[in-house]
Each structure stands twice: as C-alpha cells, then as structure tokens.
Amino acid sequence: MTSTLRPIRHEDRLSLVEHLDELRTRLIICVTAFVICFGICLWQDDVILDIINRPLQSTAFKDKESSKDPFERTAAYQAQVRRTALASAQAFEALAAQADGAAARASFTQLAAEQRKLARSVPPEEARRPVTLGVGEPFTATVRVAAYAALLLALPLLLFQAYAFVLPAFSREERSVALPLMVMVPFLFIGGVVFAYYMVLPNAIDFLQNFNDDNYDILLQAKDYYRFAITVLIAMGIAFQVPVGILAITRVGIISVAQLRKSRRYAILVIAVVAMLLPGQDPVTMLSLMLPLYVLFESSILLASLLDRRAARKESAEQESSDDLEP
C-alpha cells in the first residue's frame, strides 16, 4: 500500500486499482481537512463575519446636511442631537456652579443630568451591517462564509495532495520545475486575497454604495454582500497567479522571455481587461488593480530570465564536463 504522507516516485509503477486507491485516500484527506477547518471557522463565525464586514466601515453614514438619503439624514440628525444635548449639559452645569440659591443649583444640575441622559440615549453612529430578509438567511449566510474561509485555510494541504497525486507523471527535470510553481500558488493566492481585502474591497464598496445614493434607500442584503466580497477576494487570488502561469509557459518552452518582453503592450491590455472584468470596480480602483498585476508580470519576466540563465549555465557546464570526458 502506498504512503499518503509523501508523493510517489516517478520510478514507481502502480496498477489502476492502486491509482484509484491512492486517489480515494487523498480525497479523504482533503475532505477531512476541509471539514476540520469548516468546524473551526463555524465555531469562530463571529470573528470571521466581523473581519469580512470591516470593509463596510468605509460606507458609514456621513454627516451631510445636503444629502437626500433618509438614512444619512437620520444619522446626521442624531449626531446633531447628541452634540446639542452635551453642549446644553455643560451650559447647565456652568449655570449650576454660578447659581446663588440651593434650589437653582439643584434645578440646573437636574437639567444637566437630563441632557446627558438624552445624549447617552441617542444611538451611536455606526458602520452599516448587512441585513437579512429570509427566515433562514442568517444561518445560510454564516455557513457559506465559514465554508469559503475553511477552503482558504485548507488550500495549502489541498494543493499538496493534488501535486502529490500528479507527481508520478513528471520526470525529475519536470519535477524540479513543477515543485517551485506549486509552492508559489498558495502564497500568491493569499497575497491576492490580502491585497483585495485591504485595497480593492473597501474602495469598491464605498464607490458602489455611495453612487447616486440620494435617489435610493440603500439596504445591503447579507447574501448579496458576501457573494460580492467572496467573488472579489477569489478573483484577486486567482489574478495573482500570473507569475505561476508565466513561469510555467516559459519553462515548458511555449514562449520565450524575449517574446514576453516584446509583448508588454498586449500584457497591459490584458491586465486592463482583467481589472475591468472584476466585479464592481470604478476607474480609480481599476488602476489600483492594474499596478500590482503589472508588477507581478514584470517580476515574472525577471525571474524567468534568471532561471533561463541558470539553466543555460548548467547546460554549458554539463557540456564542458562531457567534452572533458571524451578521449
């Protein structure tokens, strides 16, 4: 029976039944890892929902007297009531300190206490949170977010199991190319998710939620928001796989580094199209997406060039060694 903790060597020969048994074992490992991560994420659902709701803080109600949005006007009115009540309390406390009689001081003190009580009773200005409309939507939305978070946590192990299963199809030389690429995938994916979370998602939500908001009573449904946020995060994680794709096609020999350098204008066009197709992007956010993708493209060309030089030096050294061995 083959070991599930390490990849099978290229020299190993397995029957069809053994391959199927190996596939079943690795699928069981993947499902088990996902279930464990899902249980942890479901246990910590408050933390995960708080994290994914933070980009909504950029759409907090703004104190705009000219706004026609009823929610923003209500928030502005409440903020004004709180400020007025606190100012009145301070004024009554000052009058109480200057009053001559005990009755006047008690009256001003009571009025100051009532004003401070009024200020405390005004709801604080908070960022928006998604709303739920269906009976089961709080449960389904929480489970969906926990499942995607679990998939993100289990991704390194899932990728290792996929790599270990297909590894026997690669020779030793091909394996030396495939292994670094597989190692880069989870790190680049996580980098794309982090970049989208801090740079893309808040700007996209702020632009879309405040676009023409004077004409709408904007309520953000949890189901739609989480679908949008997860789509943006996954899309950026996939978009950050540009170096893996470039290194793969250069190492296989489909395209050369020189051809990539000559195709920079087409690369910029493709990057612009990719940034434009990502959901909910305004022009400013689109440009902020293009910049890291282009940096990744140029870094990939540089890394591929270095690998080509290394391979050329190695091939030259082997050729010189073989020439020295010839009589």
Image (cartoon, rainbow, N blue to C red):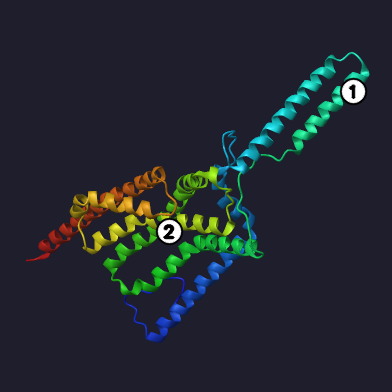
**Percent position of residue 316, x then y:** 15, 57
Nearer to the camera, 8 or 231 = 231
Residue 198 at x, y percent in the picture: 48, 46
| Circle 2 residues within 10 Å: few <14, some 14–19, many ≥20 | many
Q: CA distance from mark 2 to mark 1?
A: 68 Å
Q: Quadrant location of the C terminus?
A: bottom left
Residue shown at 22%/53% (left/top)? 260
* Mark 2 residue type: Pro
Q: Can you say whether 168 is above or below 47 in the image?
A: below
Residues at circles 2 and 1 in contact by the CB criterion of under 8 Å:
no
**54, above or below 323, in the image:** above
Q: Is residue 318 left or right of residue 216?
A: left
Q: Nearer the viewer, residue 55 or 273?
A: 273
Q: Which residue is mark 1?
A: 106
On screen, residue 126 versus residue 86, left or right, reads left
- Res 37 quadrant in image: bottom right
Which residue is rendered at x = 64% and y = 55% of the image? 46
Q: Quadrant of the N terminus?
A: bottom left
The residue drawn where x is 38% and y is 85% is 16
Q: Secondary structure at mark 1?
A: helix
Q: Which residue is mark 2?
A: 186
The image position of residue 287, as x and y in percent, is 36, 44
Res 237 → quadrant: bottom left
* Residue 52 horizontal/vertical position (percent): 56, 52
Residue 35 left/right relative to 92? left
Identify the residue at the far left of this view.
327
> Which of 128 and 23 lies nearest the eye of the viewer?
128
The amino acid marked with disc number 1 is Ala
The answer to whether residue 272 is visible is yes
- Regarding mark 2 in the picture, which secondary structure is present there? helix
Residue 1 visible in the picture? no
